[in-house]
Amino acid sequence: MTTNETKTGPRARAWLDVPFSEKDQAKAHGARWDPAAKRWFDPRPPTPGLQPWAALPDVPDLLPGEDRSFGSGLFVDMIPRTCWFTNVRTCVSPQDWERLRQMVFARAGHRCEACGAIEDRAVRRWLEAHERWSYDDRTGTQTLRRLICLCSPCHLTTHLGHANVTGRADEALTHLRRVTGMSDQQVSRHVDEAGRLWTERSARTWHLDLRMLTAAGVTLRRPEAPAQRSRTADRSLDRTRAADQSTAARPGG
């Protein structure tokens, strides 16, 4: 059995690594969705039109140097402003990001690692891969330490700064109280401390260390220089705000 096939009954699945943004294209070429595995596959391999999405070898369940105890639970963990919109997803190809997502979701049993929730399309709750970072003030290095599976409400709470920008802070804080059992006073202190740390870290630029991925055989796109990351954050934030204002202006929006 090859690395891109898994036994599912009498036949083996020829899995595909299809990014969400390309699912309609893959489906048009004959790709089919396996709801149990939550993954696309080629029903009649090898289908020529599906070769661009042929699955690459799986990444290991534990990435080299990864610490799965680092950053456990639900807490506000705001990315410094100078690092916004530059992350693992922007530094790897869509297909490699799909490989990483599939691994993270599978090893978590397709449950949020912070609250235990499963994906539920009816209530628009999704599972998302999130990065846990460490910051070395001495070297100015932002290092990837772990990838974690979070549901969309936990992910929103984690990125409270983005929740503030998009007008969803109350929703995020309500979820934080429910999952952690914190009192209003405890939440307030927690958010204040997270904000202090965010302000301190946002006052400088950071070098990105993604060696955990390259050691697993994932090829990185050329990373932006630290100063360029800050400019990218400003441009992306402006686009996000404009999109939110446009949505709010629509009838029924």
Image (cartoon, grey):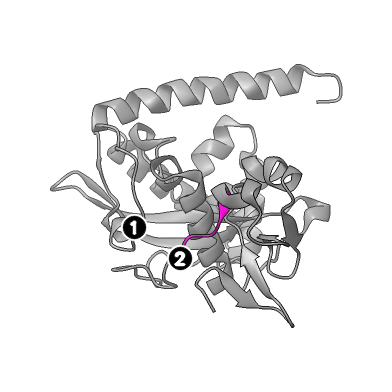
- Label 1: how many Cα within 10 Å (few below 14, some 14–19, many 20+): many
Q: Is residue 90 magenta?
A: no
Task: Using the image, determine if residue 7 lies above or below residue 196.
Answer: below
Residue 216 falls in which quadrant of the image?
bottom left
Residue 125 appearing in the image: yes
As helix, strand or loop, the secondary structure at mark 2 comes to loop
Indicate the position of residue 100 as horizontal and vertical percent values: 48, 59
Foreground: disc 1 or disc 2:
2
Q: Earlier along the polypeptide chain: callout 1 or callout 2?
A: 2
**167 or 56, which is in the foreground?**
56
Q: Quadrant of the N terminus?
A: bottom right
Residue 76 in view here: no
Residue beneath disc 1: 213
For image coordinates 33% across by 60% down, the residue present is 217
Which residue lies at the image location 25% right of the left edge and 32% below the top edge?
Answer: 226
Query: Could you tell me the amino acid type at mark 2?
Result: Pro
- Main SS, magenta region, reads loop
Q: Is residue 40 left or right of residue 162?
A: right
Q: Residue at x 60, y 18 (%)?
A: 242
Instruction: Judge the density around disc 2: few (<14), some (14-19), many (≥20) Cα neighbours within 10 Å.
Output: few
Gap between marks 1 and 2 measured at Cα: 14 Å
Q: Given contact means CB atoms under 8 Å apart, are the residues at marks 1 and 2 in contact? A: no
**Tag shown at residue 57:** 2
Q: Amino acid at mark 1?
A: Leu
From the viewer's side, name the closer residue of 166 and 240.
Answer: 240
Q: Position of residue 38 (x, y in %)?
A: 69, 63
The segment highlighted magenta reads 53-58
